[in-house]
């Protein structure tokens, strides 16, 4: 599975931005795709996930209500719409996918994700 993230850039506080993650390869085995971010000097953190079966979505408390994950199965693409961006949202954003079999209680577990995109930088100025 190959993942290509795009859509990052420099925005001002309060702006919106939509990230895209195009998947290719053996994507049918993947049961969940997610978005993570890593700010300088911090660990990579879970943001949102969407399950292939049923399309249920899951969010970190820190972004719930501001970020929305969605997918377009016809394009094999997952999106992350980010609203009301804050300077503390500045980070490299990564999309990721599992290799299948992730149960509901594990969708936030970074260790379940084995395929990673290259990351896209989001910078939010104040």
Image (cartoon, rainbow, N blue to C red):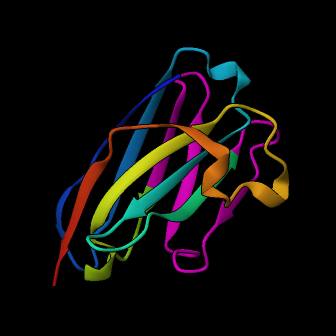
Q: On the image, which quarter does residue 92 sit in?
A: bottom left
| Residue 101 on image: x %, y % | 82, 37
66 w.r.t. 91: above or below = below
- Magenta stretch, residue numbers: 51-80
- For this rendering, which residue is in front, 73 or 26? 26
| Residue 19 on image: x %, y % | 37, 48
Magenta residue check for 95: no
Query: What residue is rendered at 60% in x and 55% in y?
Result: 110
Side of 96 relative to 37 (left or right): right
Query: What residue is rendered at 57% in x and 49% in y?
Result: 34
- For this rendering, which residue is in front, 16 or 106? 106
Query: What residue is rendered at 67% in x and 47% in y?
Result: 112
Q: On the image, which quarter does residue 126 sit in?
A: bottom left
| Residue 58 on image: x %, y % | 69, 61
| Residue 50 on image: x %, y % | 67, 48
Side of 4 relative to 104 (left or right): left
Query: What residue is rendered at 52% in x and 74% in y?
Result: 63
Magenta residue check for 73: yes
Give the tally of numbered discs.
Answer: 0
The residue most toward the bottom is 126
Side of 96 relative to 7 (left or right): right
21 w.r.t. 126: above or below = above
């Amino acid at each position: 599975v190959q993942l290509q993230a795009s859509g990052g850039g420099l925005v001002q506080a309060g702006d919106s931005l939509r990230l895209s993650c195009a998947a290719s390869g053996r994507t049918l085995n993947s049961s969940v795709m997610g978005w993570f971010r890593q700010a300088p000097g911090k660990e990579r953190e879970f943001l949102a996930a969407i399950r292939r079966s049923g399309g249920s979505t899951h969010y970190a408390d820190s972004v719930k209500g501001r970020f929305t994950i969605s997918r377009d199965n016809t394009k094999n693409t997952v999106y992350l719409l980010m609203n009301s961006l804050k300077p503390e949202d500045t980070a490299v954003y990564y999309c990721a996918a599992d290799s299948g079999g992730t149960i509901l209680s594990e969708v936030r577990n970074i260790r379940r994700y084995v395929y990673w995109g290259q990351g896209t930088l989001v910078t939010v100025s104040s």
